[in-house]
Image (cartoon, rainbow, N blue to C red):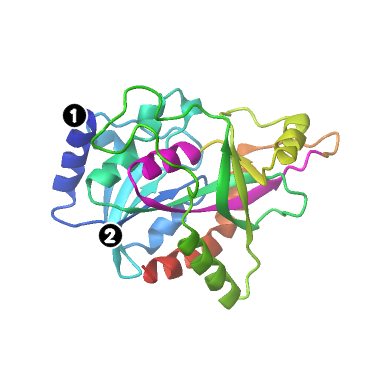
Protein backbone atom coordinates (compact mmCIF):
# COMPACT_ATOMS: atom_id res chain seq x y z
CA UNK A 1 0.00 0.00 0.00
CA UNK A 2 2.84 2.42 0.74
CA UNK A 3 4.26 1.89 -2.75
CA UNK A 4 0.83 2.46 -4.30
CA UNK A 5 0.19 5.57 -2.22
CA UNK A 6 3.60 7.00 -3.07
CA UNK A 7 2.98 6.51 -6.80
CA UNK A 8 -0.54 7.95 -6.56
CA UNK A 9 0.77 10.98 -4.66
CA UNK A 10 3.37 11.61 -7.36
CA UNK A 11 0.76 11.42 -10.12
CA UNK A 12 -1.64 13.66 -8.16
CA UNK A 13 1.06 16.31 -7.76
CA UNK A 14 1.92 16.09 -11.46
CA UNK A 15 -1.67 16.61 -12.62
CA UNK A 16 -2.04 19.64 -10.32
CA UNK A 17 -5.51 19.20 -8.90
CA UNK A 18 -7.20 17.58 -11.88
CA UNK A 19 -9.61 14.85 -10.77
CA UNK A 20 -9.84 11.93 -13.22
CA UNK A 21 -13.15 10.11 -12.96
CA UNK A 22 -12.53 7.44 -15.58
CA UNK A 23 -9.52 5.29 -16.43
CA UNK A 24 -8.68 3.84 -19.83
CA UNK A 25 -6.19 1.06 -20.60
CA UNK A 26 -5.00 1.13 -24.22
CA UNK A 27 -3.61 -2.11 -25.64
CA UNK A 28 -1.26 -2.99 -28.50
CA UNK A 29 -1.64 -0.55 -31.39
CA UNK A 30 -4.55 1.24 -29.69
CA UNK A 31 -2.61 4.09 -28.12
CA UNK A 32 -3.89 6.48 -30.79
CA UNK A 33 -7.10 6.95 -28.78
CA UNK A 34 -4.93 9.12 -26.55
CA UNK A 35 -4.66 11.61 -29.45
CA UNK A 36 -8.34 12.44 -28.86
CA UNK A 37 -7.68 13.55 -25.27
CA UNK A 38 -7.86 17.34 -25.01
CA UNK A 39 -5.54 19.50 -22.91
CA UNK A 40 -3.35 16.49 -22.17
CA UNK A 41 -0.71 16.11 -19.50
CA UNK A 42 1.75 13.33 -20.39
CA UNK A 43 3.60 11.51 -17.61
CA UNK A 44 6.06 8.74 -18.61
CA UNK A 45 5.86 5.69 -16.37
CA UNK A 46 9.63 5.86 -15.92
CA UNK A 47 9.23 9.02 -13.83
CA UNK A 48 6.78 7.53 -11.32
CA UNK A 49 8.33 6.09 -8.14
CA UNK A 50 8.14 2.29 -8.00
CA UNK A 51 6.43 2.02 -11.39
CA UNK A 52 7.29 -0.62 -14.02
CA UNK A 53 7.88 0.39 -17.65
CA UNK A 54 6.25 -0.98 -20.80
CA UNK A 55 8.51 -3.08 -23.04
CA UNK A 56 5.92 -4.61 -25.41
CA UNK A 57 5.61 -3.63 -29.07
CA UNK A 58 3.03 -0.87 -29.56
CA UNK A 59 3.06 0.31 -25.92
CA UNK A 60 4.46 3.83 -25.49
CA UNK A 61 4.51 3.81 -21.69
CA UNK A 62 2.72 6.99 -20.58
CA UNK A 63 -0.09 8.14 -18.35
CA UNK A 64 -2.14 10.78 -20.18
CA UNK A 65 -4.56 12.95 -18.18
CA UNK A 66 -6.99 15.28 -19.92
CA UNK A 67 -10.54 15.73 -21.16
CA UNK A 68 -12.45 13.27 -23.31
CA UNK A 69 -16.16 13.59 -24.11
CA UNK A 70 -16.56 16.12 -21.33
CA UNK A 71 -14.93 13.95 -18.66
CA UNK A 72 -11.54 14.12 -17.01
CA UNK A 73 -9.82 10.82 -17.84
CA UNK A 74 -6.52 9.14 -17.13
CA UNK A 75 -5.35 6.83 -19.91
CA UNK A 76 -2.61 4.23 -19.91
CA UNK A 77 -0.84 4.53 -23.25
CA UNK A 78 0.58 1.04 -22.95
CA UNK A 79 0.14 -1.55 -20.22
CA UNK A 80 2.27 -4.11 -18.37
CA UNK A 81 2.24 -7.86 -18.95
CA UNK A 82 3.11 -10.91 -16.89
CA UNK A 83 5.26 -12.16 -19.79
CA UNK A 84 7.54 -9.14 -19.42
CA UNK A 85 8.73 -10.71 -16.18
CA UNK A 86 6.77 -8.46 -13.85
CA UNK A 87 4.93 -9.89 -10.84
CA UNK A 88 1.18 -9.42 -10.90
CA UNK A 89 1.46 -6.66 -8.29
CA UNK A 90 3.38 -4.63 -10.90
CA UNK A 91 1.17 -5.69 -13.82
CA UNK A 92 -1.88 -4.28 -12.01
CA UNK A 93 -0.25 -1.38 -10.17
CA UNK A 94 -1.52 1.32 -12.51
CA UNK A 95 -5.16 0.33 -12.03
CA UNK A 96 -4.81 0.54 -8.25
CA UNK A 97 -3.11 3.93 -8.57
CA UNK A 98 -6.06 5.08 -10.68
CA UNK A 99 -8.40 3.97 -7.91
CA UNK A 100 -6.44 5.91 -5.30
CA UNK A 101 -6.71 8.97 -7.57
CA UNK A 102 -10.52 8.66 -7.48
CA UNK A 103 -11.25 6.66 -10.63
CA UNK A 104 -14.34 4.45 -10.23
CA UNK A 105 -14.92 3.33 -13.84
CA UNK A 106 -12.35 1.54 -15.99
CA UNK A 107 -12.35 0.99 -19.75
CA UNK A 108 -9.97 -1.70 -21.03
CA UNK A 109 -8.98 -2.55 -24.58
CA UNK A 110 -6.72 -5.09 -26.20
CA UNK A 111 -5.57 -6.69 -29.43
CA UNK A 112 -6.65 -10.34 -29.56
CA UNK A 113 -6.72 -13.37 -31.79
CA UNK A 114 -10.16 -14.32 -33.08
CA UNK A 115 -10.68 -17.97 -32.15
CA UNK A 116 -14.38 -17.78 -32.96
CA UNK A 117 -14.51 -18.86 -36.62
CA UNK A 118 -17.06 -16.13 -37.38
CA UNK A 119 -14.63 -13.36 -36.40
CA UNK A 120 -12.50 -11.56 -38.98
CA UNK A 121 -9.41 -9.37 -38.70
CA UNK A 122 -10.49 -5.82 -37.85
CA UNK A 123 -13.71 -6.86 -36.05
CA UNK A 124 -14.55 -5.45 -32.63
CA UNK A 125 -15.82 -7.52 -29.71
CA UNK A 126 -17.43 -6.25 -26.52
CA UNK A 127 -16.14 -8.41 -23.67
CA UNK A 128 -18.98 -9.82 -21.57
CA UNK A 129 -16.94 -12.38 -19.59
CA UNK A 130 -13.49 -13.92 -19.44
CA UNK A 131 -11.58 -17.14 -18.82
CA UNK A 132 -8.21 -16.77 -17.11
CA UNK A 133 -5.17 -18.98 -17.56
CA UNK A 134 -3.01 -16.37 -15.85
CA UNK A 135 -1.99 -16.17 -12.18
CA UNK A 136 -4.61 -14.35 -10.10
CA UNK A 137 -3.26 -10.90 -9.09
CA UNK A 138 -4.99 -11.15 -5.70
CA UNK A 139 -2.87 -14.10 -4.55
CA UNK A 140 -1.01 -13.15 -1.40
CA UNK A 141 -1.98 -10.93 1.54
CA UNK A 142 -5.20 -9.04 0.86
CA UNK A 143 -5.04 -5.25 0.68
CA UNK A 144 -8.03 -4.63 2.93
CA UNK A 145 -7.97 -0.88 2.18
CA UNK A 146 -8.81 -1.68 -1.45
CA UNK A 147 -11.30 -4.55 -1.28
CA UNK A 148 -12.44 -7.86 0.24
CA UNK A 149 -10.48 -11.09 0.43
CA UNK A 150 -12.93 -12.90 -1.88
CA UNK A 151 -14.38 -10.44 -4.42
CA UNK A 152 -17.39 -11.47 -6.48
CA UNK A 153 -16.78 -11.95 -10.22
CA UNK A 154 -20.30 -12.85 -11.34
CA UNK A 155 -20.46 -9.73 -13.53
CA UNK A 156 -16.87 -8.63 -14.17
CA UNK A 157 -17.98 -6.42 -17.08
CA UNK A 158 -20.76 -3.93 -16.33
CA UNK A 159 -24.06 -5.01 -17.98
CA UNK A 160 -25.40 -1.45 -18.27
CA UNK A 161 -22.25 -0.25 -20.06
CA UNK A 162 -22.42 -3.27 -22.39
CA UNK A 163 -26.03 -2.40 -23.30
CA UNK A 164 -25.11 1.22 -24.01
CA UNK A 165 -22.15 0.19 -26.17
CA UNK A 166 -24.34 -2.18 -28.19
CA UNK A 167 -26.82 0.64 -28.78
CA UNK A 168 -24.05 3.03 -29.84
CA UNK A 169 -22.62 0.52 -32.33
CA UNK A 170 -26.12 -0.14 -33.73
CA UNK A 171 -26.77 3.60 -34.13
CA UNK A 172 -23.55 3.87 -36.15
CA UNK A 173 -24.50 0.88 -38.29
CA UNK A 174 -21.50 -1.11 -37.11
CA UNK A 175 -21.48 -4.84 -36.49
CA UNK A 176 -19.85 -5.51 -33.12
CA UNK A 177 -19.47 -8.97 -31.60
CA UNK A 178 -20.03 -9.76 -27.94
CA UNK A 179 -18.18 -12.63 -26.31
CA UNK A 180 -15.61 -14.15 -23.99
CA UNK A 181 -11.96 -13.08 -23.74
CA UNK A 182 -9.56 -15.87 -22.83
CA UNK A 183 -6.26 -14.73 -21.34
CA UNK A 184 -3.10 -16.83 -21.28
CA UNK A 185 0.39 -15.78 -20.27
CA UNK A 186 2.22 -15.56 -23.61
CA UNK A 187 4.61 -14.39 -24.90
CA UNK A 188 4.61 -17.22 -27.45
CA UNK A 189 1.57 -17.24 -29.70
CA UNK A 190 -0.73 -20.20 -29.27
CA UNK A 191 -0.45 -23.45 -31.21
CA UNK A 192 -3.30 -24.51 -33.52
CA UNK A 193 -4.27 -27.19 -30.99
CA UNK A 194 -4.41 -24.58 -28.22
CA UNK A 195 -6.58 -22.33 -30.35
CA UNK A 196 -9.03 -25.20 -30.89
CA UNK A 197 -8.97 -26.08 -27.18
CA UNK A 198 -9.61 -22.48 -26.12
CA UNK A 199 -12.58 -22.28 -28.48
CA UNK A 200 -13.92 -25.61 -27.18
CA UNK A 201 -13.91 -24.34 -23.58
CA UNK A 202 -15.81 -21.17 -24.48
CA UNK A 203 -13.35 -18.52 -25.65
CA UNK A 204 -14.12 -16.21 -28.56
CA UNK A 205 -10.84 -14.30 -28.59
CA UNK A 206 -7.48 -14.92 -26.94
CA UNK A 207 -4.86 -12.51 -25.64
CA UNK A 208 -2.10 -12.01 -23.08
CA UNK A 209 -3.41 -9.16 -20.91
CA UNK A 210 -6.52 -7.42 -19.53
CA UNK A 211 -7.84 -9.99 -17.05
CA UNK A 212 -5.46 -9.12 -14.17
CA UNK A 213 -6.44 -5.46 -14.53
CA UNK A 214 -10.13 -6.34 -14.51
CA UNK A 215 -9.76 -8.52 -11.41
CA UNK A 216 -8.07 -5.80 -9.36
CA UNK A 217 -10.55 -3.20 -10.64
CA UNK A 218 -13.47 -5.35 -9.51
CA UNK A 219 -11.66 -6.00 -6.22
CA UNK A 220 -11.73 -2.21 -5.72
CA UNK A 221 -15.41 -2.05 -6.69
CA UNK A 222 -14.80 -0.28 -10.01
CA UNK A 223 -17.19 -0.61 -12.96
CA UNK A 224 -15.46 -2.18 -15.98
CA UNK A 225 -16.12 -2.05 -19.72
CA UNK A 226 -13.89 -3.89 -22.18
CA UNK A 227 -13.42 -4.27 -25.93
CA UNK A 228 -11.12 -6.41 -28.06
CA UNK A 229 -9.89 -5.68 -31.56
CA UNK A 230 -9.51 -8.89 -33.58
CA UNK A 231 -6.04 -8.59 -35.06
CA UNK A 232 -5.68 -12.07 -36.53
CA UNK A 233 -7.94 -15.01 -37.30
CA UNK A 234 -6.98 -17.92 -35.07
CA UNK A 235 -9.62 -20.60 -35.45
CA UNK A 236 -6.94 -23.31 -35.57
CA UNK A 237 -6.77 -24.06 -39.31
CA UNK A 238 -3.73 -22.49 -40.96
CA UNK A 239 -1.83 -22.74 -44.21
CA UNK A 240 1.50 -24.54 -43.92
CA UNK A 241 3.48 -21.30 -44.31
CA UNK A 242 1.32 -19.17 -41.96
CA UNK A 243 3.08 -17.24 -39.16
CA UNK A 244 1.80 -14.95 -36.39
CA UNK A 245 3.72 -11.69 -36.38
CA UNK A 246 3.69 -9.08 -33.59
CA UNK A 247 4.14 -6.14 -35.96
CA UNK A 248 1.17 -7.30 -38.05
CA UNK A 249 -0.95 -7.45 -34.87
CA UNK A 250 -0.11 -3.81 -34.07
CA UNK A 251 -0.88 -2.73 -37.65
CA UNK A 252 -4.27 -4.48 -37.58
CA UNK A 253 -5.12 -2.93 -34.21
CA UNK A 254 -4.15 0.52 -35.47
CA UNK A 255 -6.42 0.10 -38.51
CA UNK A 256 -9.43 -0.62 -36.26
CA UNK A 257 -8.57 1.95 -33.58
CA UNK A 258 -10.79 4.67 -35.05
CA UNK A 259 -13.95 2.60 -34.52
CA UNK A 260 -12.97 1.63 -30.99
CA UNK A 261 -12.18 5.29 -30.25
CA UNK A 262 -15.58 6.40 -31.50
CA UNK A 263 -17.43 3.87 -29.35
CA UNK A 264 -15.36 4.72 -26.26
CA UNK A 265 -15.90 8.45 -26.74
CA UNK A 266 -19.66 8.15 -27.20
CA UNK A 267 -19.96 5.75 -24.27
CA UNK A 268 -17.96 8.05 -22.00
CA UNK A 269 -20.29 10.92 -22.93
CA UNK A 270 -23.21 8.97 -21.42
CA UNK A 271 -21.59 8.57 -17.99
Residue at 35 percent across and 50 percent down: it is: 222
Residue at 38 percent across and 39 percent down: it is: 216
| Magenta part of the chain | 210-236
Residue at 63 percent across and 27 percent down: it is: 188
Residue at the spot of label 2:
66
Say which mark, if any, is on residue 2. Answer: 1
Q: Name, please, the residue furthest toward the right.
A: 240
Instruction: Assess whether residue 170 is covered by the magenta stretch.
Output: no
81 lies above or below 122: above
Say which mark, if any, is on residue 245. Answer: none
Instruction: Give percent across and percent down for residue 11.
Output: 20, 44
Judging depth in this view, the residue of 42 and 185 nearest the camera is 185
Label 1 secondary element = helix
Residue at 72 percent across and 54 percent down: it is: 119
Instruction: Give percent across and percent down for residue 236.
Output: 79, 38
Q: Residues within 10 Å of mark 1 (few under 14, many from 20)?
A: few
Q: Residues within 10 Å of mark 2 (few under 14, many from 20)?
A: many
Judging depth in this view, the residue of 21 and 68 nearest the camera is 21
Amino acid sequence: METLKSAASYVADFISGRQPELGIVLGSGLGSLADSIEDPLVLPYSQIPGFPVSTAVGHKGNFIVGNLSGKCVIAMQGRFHFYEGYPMTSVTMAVRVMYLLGVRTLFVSNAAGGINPEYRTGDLMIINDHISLQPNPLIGPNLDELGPRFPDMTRPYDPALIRRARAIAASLGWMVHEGVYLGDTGPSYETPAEYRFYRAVGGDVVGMSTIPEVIVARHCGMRVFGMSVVTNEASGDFAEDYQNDGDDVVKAADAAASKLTRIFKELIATL
